Amino acid sequence: MTVLRAALTASRLLSEDPAWRLLRANNAAIAVAVLSKHLGGEQRRLAAPALFEQVEEDLEELRGNGFDLPQTAQAYCTAWRNDGILIRRTAEGSREETFELSLGSLQAIRFVTELSEPRQAVTESRLATILDRVRVLARETDPDSTSRLRALHEERARIDAQIERAAGGDVDVLSAEQAAERLRDVLSLIEEIPSDFARVRSELEQLNRDLRERLIEQDGPRGSVLDDIFRGVDLLAASEAGRSFSGFYALLLDPEQGRDFEDSIDTIMDREFTSRLSATQVRTLRRILPTLQDRSSEIHAVMTAFSRSLRRFVQSQELEQDRLINQRLRSALRQALETSQAVKPYAKTELSLDLTSVPLNSVAALNLHNPADFEAAGEIIEHDAETVDIEELRALARASEIDMFELTGNINAVLSRQSAATIADVLADRPATQGVASVVGLLVLAEEHATALSGREDVTWQPPAPSPNGSGTTRRGTVGRYLFTERIHL
């Protein structure tokens, strides 16, 4: 690519690409921080009112710390949507709009994250992965059966040698540093998956639009696209993006592959080197398979909906109506082009057009609302309000929500007397006043503020109120081991 071509391409991307537009915005730091918090984690889509409310809370906090943010959350979200940073869609089965990050936004946020948390690019595990993939690619693309057979024999000899060494007790075990390094490379690949899903959805949406345009612009009653659709060909699934995703989706839904993957994750999490990971990384590893399945099911549903709507578009009258409108528009443009050769654009004509407009009426023409028209025919019966028991209301509120402030105080109280404590230690010192809800709350706090350890531990608690199974019955359960070492500030 020449310098001129590269410069022209960069200039186009500078004005068109959402990733570059986000990074060069005046409030780029605010946008990256806010959007990555609400739409860059496990939550990838939010309803518009919920997003406005959460962003407004963040803006209030930022304004209190010296940031100049004069607009409202809705105004900022609208600007981000106009710049292609946010994508607005209508939720299925609801009239409520949702927002999610575009592909460019995900790429920009990931770029900023790598700047703030740089990874070691030159690692032994990454080089080993490259060498192994190149070796497998060379072997599996070789049409010569002799060389393929020789490579397989060499592979079998290497495996037999490893079996003999393992039978003799000679086993090579990766060091904790090497294992953690390879696991971080896996996490780096996992972080690229949201961008891959966004890219697939964007390609499917663009392909759906292109197919509809080709159907409308094709001359004559039939065309290649129309013939394929009438023959039952799923053009979206047959595309390059569709074939790639279908292979990925089929592999992901394989029950044997899923069980092997979950067993491997459980085995890895029991290893000592996983203590070098953060709580967020541990949660990512444990949630990777359900997250992949949820996101893949969403993309599969989108592809199915597009295919059905495309076929319905062809079989209904919509296609003929759109073709007729397209033909008339093209005819009008052709006639305008021919007329422009003889008539100047500023020449006056005797043609008058009645443009659509909003009718303006006086205020006196409006029909005012008369409450008497809706007066109830029957007599209104008044009921005396009962006295409210404030203690009963407090008990109801406490039963409907986990008391995180109480649990945080319990953890801090235990840590004030000892340097570290597990969930079982906290429950032994401060009983679970909300029963199993207190145990769940401690697990939530542990995932965010404690260090995950290998193994599990037993915990006990009692129901907070009499139950059908009996009052005061001690319950027992098993949870993962977490170690609290620092006080928690909410």
Image (cartoon, grey):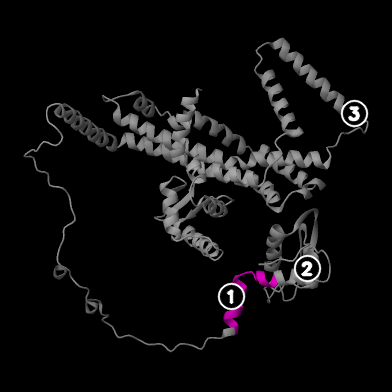
Distance from Cα at disc 3 to Cα at disc 1: 63 Å
User: Nearest the camera: 122 or 311?
Assistant: 122
Vertical order, 71 against 291 (above or below):
below
Quick check: is 141 in the magenta stretch? Answer: no
Q: Is residue 1 above or below residue 406?
A: above
Question: Which structural element holds mark 2?
Answer: helix
Q: Dot 1 surroundings within 10 Å: few (below 14), some, or many (20 or more)?
A: few
| Mark positioned earlier in the residue sequence (1 or 2) | 1
Q: Is residue 347 left or right of residue 233?
A: left
- Main SS, magenta region, reads helix
Q: Under tag 1, what secondary structure? A: helix
Marks 1/2: CA distance?
A: 24 Å
Amino acid of disc 1: Ala
The residue tagged 2 is 426
Q: Which label's residue is closer to the chain start, 3 or 2?
A: 3
Quadrant hosting residue 318: top left
- The kind of residue on which mark 2 rests is Val
Does the segment drawn in magenta span residue 402? yes
Counting from the top left corner in percent of width and height, residue 112 is at: 59, 45
Nearer to us of marks 3 and 2 is: 2
Q: Residues within 10 Å of mark 2 (few under 14, many from 20)?
A: many
* Residue occupied by mark 1: 397
- x and y percent of residue 170 in the render? 91, 32
For the view shown, which residue lies furthest in the left direction? 350
Q: Which region is colored magenta?
A: 391-407
Contact between marks 3 and 1 (CB within 8 A): the answer is no
Residue 125 at what x, y percent from top left?
A: 75, 34
Residue at the (35%, 37%) spot, across then down: 312
Look at the image and tell me whether residue 303 can be seen: no
Q: Which residue is mark 3?
A: 165
